[in-house]
């Protein structure tokens, strides 16, 4: 039996090595895809409450999804995940407006910035990015798109507190899986 195994390994060692590398690569790729799908799905799921609400709260996972995937996988994957998360949640709400398009640009900018700070603590980085996003979003919605201050503040404050919670409690755990 031992000679048979040795003979098999000797004859097929290239295939065995190739099989191991393909398996490791495939598992890594499938794991990344599953995490990204999970983030996009839950972005949509959490945002589905908005269809029944008369006001707009900032309870969503778009920023968390963008920051985590940009932090772990880089600008391109972070941008795609952020765009997909925002798209499915906006599609479900049925809300597309100039401010939504501006949010896509902010998400792309955030996805570009995050990899530059990949050695920074994810909680601290996420909170700083949330402050940046909410300040920019509030300024743009009130200043350029004739938004109501109360609506903009409601979104910004709820978004800030929800994301502080996410980046302090959820992001470090999710990052462990990534």
Image (cartoon, rainbow, N blue to C red):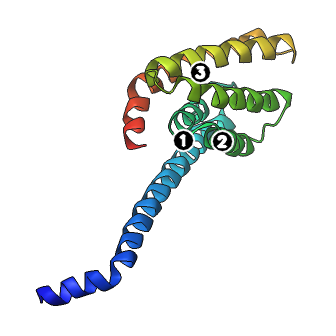
Looking at the image, residue 101 sits to the left or right of residue 31; the answer is right
- How far apart marks 3 and 1 lie (CA) works out to 24 Å
Instruction: Find residue 117 and report its horizontal and vertical position in percent.
Output: 53, 23
Disc 3 crowd, CA 10 A, few/some/many (<14, 14-19, 20+)? many
Disc 1 secondary structure class? helix
Label 2 crowd (10 A; few <14 / some 14-19 / many >=20): some
Q: In this view, does 112 lie above or below 26?
A: above
Badge nearest the viewer, 2 or 3: 2
Point 52% across, 17% down: residue: 127
Q: For this rendering, which residue is in front, 66 or 24?
A: 24
- Which quadrant holds residue 28? bottom left
Q: For mark 3, give the secondary structure.
A: helix
Identify the image quadrant of the C terminus. top left
Q: Position of residue 57 (x, y in %)?
A: 63, 24
> Dot 1: few (<14), some (14–19), or many (≥20) neighbours within 10 Å?
some
Q: In which quarter of the image is the N terminus?
A: bottom left
Q: Name the residue under label 1.
A: 73
Residue corresponding to mark 3: 159
Q: Is disc 2 in contact with disc 3, using a CB cutoff of under 8 Å?
A: no
Name of the residue lying farthest toward the front? 10
Q: Please report whichever mark, 2 or 3, sits nearer to the chain's N-terminal start.
A: 2
Name the residue tied to disc 2: 76
Spatial distance from mark 1 to mark 2, Cα to Cα? 8 Å
């Amino acid at each position: 039996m031992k000679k048979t195994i040795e003979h098999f390994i000797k004859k097929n060692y290239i295939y065995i090595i190739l099989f191991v590398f393909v398996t490791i690569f495939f598992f890594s790729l499938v794991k990344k895809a599953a995490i990204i799908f999970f983030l996009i799905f839950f972005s949509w799921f959490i945002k589905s409450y908005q269809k029944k609400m008369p006001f707009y709260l900032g309870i969503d996972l778009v920023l968390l999804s963008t920051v985590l995937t940009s932090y772990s996988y880089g600008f391109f994957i972070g941008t795609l995940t952020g765009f997909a998360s925002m798209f499915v949640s906006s599609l479900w709400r049925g809300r597309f407006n100039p401010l939504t398009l501006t949010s896509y640009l902010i998400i792309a900018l955030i996805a570009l910035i995050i990899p530059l700070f990949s050695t920074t603590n994810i909680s601290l980085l996420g909170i700083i990015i949330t402050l940046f996003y909410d300040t920019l979003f509030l300024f743009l919605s009130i200043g350029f798109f004739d938004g109501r201050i109360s609506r903009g503040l409601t979104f910004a404050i709820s978004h800030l507190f929800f994301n502080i919670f996410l980046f302090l409690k959820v992001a470090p755990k999710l990052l462990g899986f990534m």
